[in-house]
Structures are given as structure tokens and as C-alpha cells.
Amino acid sequence: MSKAFIAAVLQDSLDCTGVAAARGAEALLGAIVAELQNEGSFTLPSFGTFTVRETNARRALNPRTGEPVSVEAGRTVRFKASPLLKKAV
């Protein structure tokens, strides 16, 4: 799924212009990112939950050269699907 897809769905369902739908899609995604930054999680009922998780520093391998590489600790976003989504799919 892309921003363009979300904008197209918004445009069709709201019967608005493409520019307005693109602004709406951008605002929606921006609100989700802001909520993840501020609260650490975001739930869409009947769809699932996005949560921010900390990752540990680790050693990995460069797939091209096979050399060991250090990967710093950081943060990532995880998604857990709701039971309704799992049942629908």
C-alpha cells in the first residue's frame, strides 16, 4: 500500500479532488507517525496495533562481502494484526 493508493481510496469515497485526497493521506500518515513518536503505540480498531520497540546492538554479516558488521541499538516499529483482520484474511 502506498500514499497514492490511500489518496485514491479517499478521493473515491469522499468524492473530492486528487489534491485534497493527497493532503488527507499525508495528514493521516503524519498523525500516525506523531502518535508513534509521542505515545509509542497506535491502534486501529479491527485492523491492528503498531508499537515502537527498542532493538539491541548486535553483530551482523555484510551479505555481499561476508564481513562482520556492528549494528547499533535503535528503534523499530512492530505490527500485530487484530483477530478480525486475521479472520478476514
Image (tube, rainbow, N blue to C red):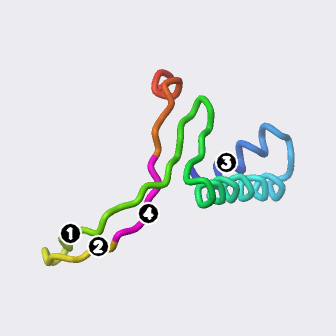
Residue highlighted by disc 4: 75
**Element class at badge 1:** strand
Q: Nearer the viewer, mark 2 or mark 3?
A: 2
Give the residues in magenta: 73-78
The mark found on residue 71 in the picture is 2
* Rendered view: 10 above or below 64: above
Estimate the spatial distance between the alpha carbons at disc 2 and disc 1, rounded to whole Å.
Answer: 7 Å
Q: Main secondary structure of the magenta part?
A: strand
Estimate the spatial distance between the alpha carbons at disc 4 and disc 1, rounded to whole Å.
Answer: 17 Å
Residue highlighted by disc 1: 60
- Tag count in the figure? 4
Q: Amino acid at mark 2?
A: Val
Q: Amino acid at mark 3?
A: Ile
Q: Residues within 10 Å of mark 3 (few under 14, many from 20)?
A: some
Estimate the spatial distance between the alpha carbons at disc 2 and disc 3, rounded to whole Å.
Answer: 34 Å
Q: Nearer the viewer, residue 67 or 77?
A: 77
Residues at marks 1 and 3 touching, judged by CB atoms closer than 8 Å: no
Residue highlighted by disc 3: 6
Does 32 appear in magenta? no
**Element class at badge 3:** helix
Q: Which residue lies at the image location 48% right of the left edge and 35% below the top edge? A: 81
Q: Amino acid at mark 4?
A: Arg
Residue 47 pos. (x, y %) = 57, 34
In the picture, measured across the screen, residue 69 lies left or right of residue 40, that is left
Q: Nearer the viewer, residue 70 or 47?
A: 70
* Marked residue nearer the N-terminal end (4 or 3): 3
Estimate the spatial distance between the alpha carbons at disc 1 and disc 3, rounded to whole Å.
Answer: 36 Å
User: Residue at the top extreme?
Assistant: 87
Residue 17 pos. (x, y %) = 85, 52
